[in-house]
Image (spheres, coloured by chain):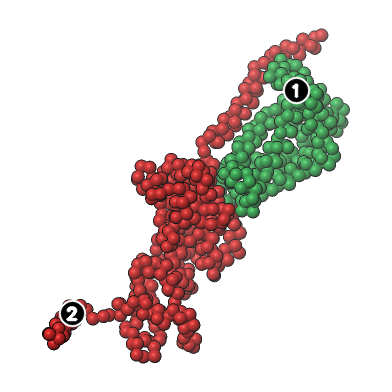
Chain colours: A green, B red
Amino acid sequence: MSHENMEYVHPLPVRIWHWVNAAGFILLVITGFQIRFAEYLGYMSFETAVTVHNWVGFIVIADYFLWFLYYFGTGKIRIYYPDLNTFIPRMIKQAQFYGYGIFVGDENPHHMTADNKFNAMQQKAYIMIMFILVPLQLLTGLFLWDITQFSGFVDFMGGVKIVDTIHVFLFYFFVTFMFVHAYLSTLGHTATAHMIAMFTGWEEHH
Amino acid sequence: MKKKRLLVYGLSAMFMSFVLPAPSIADVSNDSCMECHSDDSLERDASTGHNPGLFVDIEKFNASPHNFDEESCVGCHSDIEELDWDADLPHGVDLATPDCAECHDETAPAFAESVHAENDITCYACHVYHGPEQVASRLTAATLQTDFCGNCHVATDSHDWLPQKELHLSSIQCTVCHAPEGGTHVRFRFYNSYADHYLSAAEIKAGLKIDGDFMDVYDADQDGFISSAEYFTLSQDIRKRAFVSDFRVELTSDSDPLVHKIHSDGAIRDCETCHGADSALFANAKIELRGDDGSIRLIPVDGQAAASYNVKNFFSLSATRFLFLDLTGLLLILGGIGVAMLHFSIRQFTQPIRDRRKAAEKSH
């Protein structure tokens, strides 16, 4: 396979993390809806839903550590840090592109490279997601898995209902994120370019 | 004069002996029995095959439902026909085991169908003779598990299939799942979590700073039921009056004879039985006010109160099912999909603009 005009942007650990996380999130969403709306939905028993949700939850937690160790271990975590000097104008430019430029055929102001993978809007979203929202979701999920064992943390957060409310709200957020994320992945130079790159690691330059 | 008085007394005594029944064994007061049985060293020959201990803790008996129902020692030990105070032992030594079914005629058939009856377990193996307790309807799940069922069964050794095993075992009485025909309610107990102490009715009144009856204060519409709104007032008062208490809530068996029908198999294992917003188990809820004498008063309360934020140990699936959260979630998801679809549609709609621009760039 020739990699002319191609750039290796997604190393193997990142691709493994991404797809394990994606499959895990899908299973967590399916079982999560069954758990929360047990009396309306019946596509699996509550017991199965809880068991699968717990197991997959732990896989996703382990997967998060893969992401964490890879990015911090290699120092590549820098790609998540916005350059504070240029961040705001770049974000405005990026928003203008998605809100207008993309419709009239303007070039994407951001050019993906291995060291500069995310555009300003992605940086803003992902730094929030990977540093705050995902850890919060994993932690609240862990606490809810065994409330008695983690009762000290649960009480500190204001009781199980607060913990559950955070978990459920983030659950809705991540469901939304998955739809928007899947749509945005079709905005490459072809509809499937970004998705294929997430499997092969190589993104084509245009 | 003296003779006349003696005659009157004599005739009166004769008359009374006809009118009043002769003293029967049922008239033997418990005090008579306790003359001997309060001695904690009183024992009988173990070779009789009976429990050698003959001591009766009258305080335990007095706190038992038998005493509240004015049952006496000889009410159960009905084969004691007379007390002969002149003999070495005032009554026979080989007394029959009391037949609880004589009075507990609704409990007996339920018990007969239980795994306990199958294994020849006696009533007093659980209920303790001479100080029987109404076990399930009075005790916390934890006490029931450790001091009663726990005498024979170690709940934590099984139930591995159960998610949140420890939480379930500490907030659901064994009988809720293992004797489901007995009926269930959600029991609210005032609890000081700092002191790890369940509060008595007197402590609750003192904490809430109320003078009158609990229901006179909190049952605003005087319908004998604490509605959600009335429960909210109670919750507010707990905070406003700096009353160090929250609620510990448990699934508790009703005081029903069928609670004795413990199944050897067929215990509830469908999570949905409890874990649904419309679960019947949560429809029936009661606040417990326990008197210093051990009496219990149960006040009906709206089951949805179990989902309130001052209930910390108990978690039904409906607990966070408040409309705002789910509505926010729905709007978020629909909004996300909507924005993506709108963006996609505009892209489709503007395709000719991009095509024209591309063609123009090519021609340059």
Kindly identify which residue carries mark 2: B16
Secondary structure at numbered mark 1: helix
Kindly identify which residue carries mark 1: A88
Amino acid at pointer 2: Met
Mark 2, other Cα within 10 Å: few <14 / some 14–19 / many ≥20: few
- Asked whether residue A9 appears in the rendered view, the answer is no
- Asked whether residue A62 appears in the rendered view, the answer is yes
**Rendering quarter of residue B6:** bottom left
**Rendering quarter of residue B76:** bottom left
Q: Chain of mark 1?
A: A
- Residue at coordinates 63% horizontally, 34% vertically from top-left? A173
Inter-mark Cα distance, 1 to 2: 109 Å
Front position in the image: B48 or B232 = B232
Up the image or down, B360 lies above or below A129; here it is above
- Residue at coordinates 44% horizontally, 57% vertically from top-left? B290
Q: Chain of mark 2?
A: B
- Residue at coordinates 64% horizontally, 53% vertically from top-left? A149
Q: Which label number is shown at residue B162?
A: none
Secondary structure at numbered mark 2: helix
Q: Position of residue A165 (x, y in %)?
A: 58, 40
